[in-house]
Image: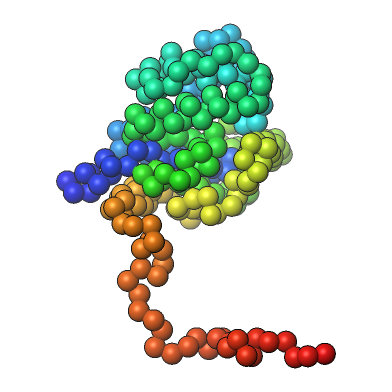
């Protein structure tokens, strides 16, 4: 147990990407509590919006794709969580897209530098893609299961819950495509993708912790030695569907 804890301590962050209504936000909160790490989530942005005197609706719009109040919110994160964002220098107020992206990058980089953070959304899985000391997680669930979740958690009828989910998903997809030319649905952006239609929230937290431990134990492994080939011998015989270069040559017309 002590060895696992020491390995986990080498990791700097976990990013959580989630389909709306999959329970990803709740999982992130439970995970942060379980690990005793700091949670950087949507609620932080909403609290900052209150401090700045902007509406929660504006904050929600910004958090997914808008540029308008982004620099004010990101700059103010330093005031709300100075111990985490101490390395992020203040950014000037601006509505420029480039300045916004630089501010977002600075805030996330500063949080990771401090370490032991669970970051929900904000394109962190892309911004931190090249860091081996960060675990990237995607939480998904079928639409029907997500509708049931949103109906129960938000007190909505079925049609309203469906519309809310679809609107949120469109915003998130547009956001990542606009800022990074990528789709959040691309599984190659993540170390692990978990489906909460068959996993309880607590078992999902346990699996993420296990993945965190496993990734931590391989931090010192050279990149070229990572992957499914590690430690495997050659097949004793060629696979049945193996084709030689000669058989793959198209016949002359």
In the image, what residue occupies the spot 41% across and 27% down?
A: 110
Which colour scheme appears in the figure? rainbow
State the residue in front, 66 or 128: 128
- Horizontal side, residue 152 vs residue 87: left or right: right
- Horizontal side, residue 94 vs residue 205: left or right: right
- Horizontal side, residue 88 vs residue 21: left or right: left
State the residue in front, 87 or 27: 87
In the image, what residue occupies the spot 17% across and 46% down?
A: 2
Q: Quadrant of the C terminus?
A: bottom right
Q: Position of residue 247 (x, y in %)?
A: 64, 90
Which residue of the protein is positioned furthest toward the front in this rendering? 252
Q: Position of residue 175 (x, y in %)?
A: 65, 36
In the image, what residue occupies the spot 66% across and 21% down?
A: 96
Q: Position of residue 148 (x, y in %)?
A: 59, 43
Which residue of the protein is positioned furthest toward the right in this rendering? 253
> Does residue 30 appear in the picture of this structure?
no
Residue 172, picture quadrant? top right
Q: Is residue 40 above or below residue 149?
A: above
State the residue in front, 118 or 250: 250
In the image, what residue occupies the spot 46% across and 30% down?
A: 108
State the residue in front, 198 or 140: 140
């Amino acid at each position: 147990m002590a060895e696992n804890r020491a390995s986990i301590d080498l990791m700097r962050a976990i990013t959580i990407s989630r389909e709306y209504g999959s329970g990803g936000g709740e999982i992130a909160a439970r995970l942060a509590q379980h690990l005793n790490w700091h949670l950087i989530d949507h609620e932080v942005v909403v609290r900052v919006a209150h401090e700045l005197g902007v509406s929660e609706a504006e904050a929600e719009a910004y958090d997914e794709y808008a540029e308008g109040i982004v620099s004010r919110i990101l700059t103010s994160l330093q005031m709300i969580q100075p111990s985490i964002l101490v390395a992020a220098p203040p950014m000037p107020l601006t509505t420029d897209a480039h300045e916004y992206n630089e501010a977002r990058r600075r805030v996330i980089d500063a949080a990771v530098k401090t370490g032991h953070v669970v970051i929900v959304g904000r394109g962190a899985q892309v911004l931190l893609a090249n860091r081996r000391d960060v675990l990237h997680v995607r939480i998904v669930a079928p639409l029907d299961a997500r509708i049931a979740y949103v109906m129960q958690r938000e007190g909505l009828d079925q049609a309203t819950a469906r519309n809310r989910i679809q609107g949120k998903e469109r915003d998130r997809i547009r956001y990542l495509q606009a800022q990074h030319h990528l789709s959040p649905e691309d599984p190659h952006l993540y170390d692990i993708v978990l489906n909460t239609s068959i996993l309880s929230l607590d078992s999902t937290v346990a699996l993420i912790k296990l993945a965190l431990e496993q990734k931590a134990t391989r931090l010192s492994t050279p990149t070229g030695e990572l992957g499914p080939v590690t430690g495997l011998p050659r097949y004793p015989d060629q696979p049945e569907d193996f084709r030689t270069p000669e058989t793959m040559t198209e016949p002359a017309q």
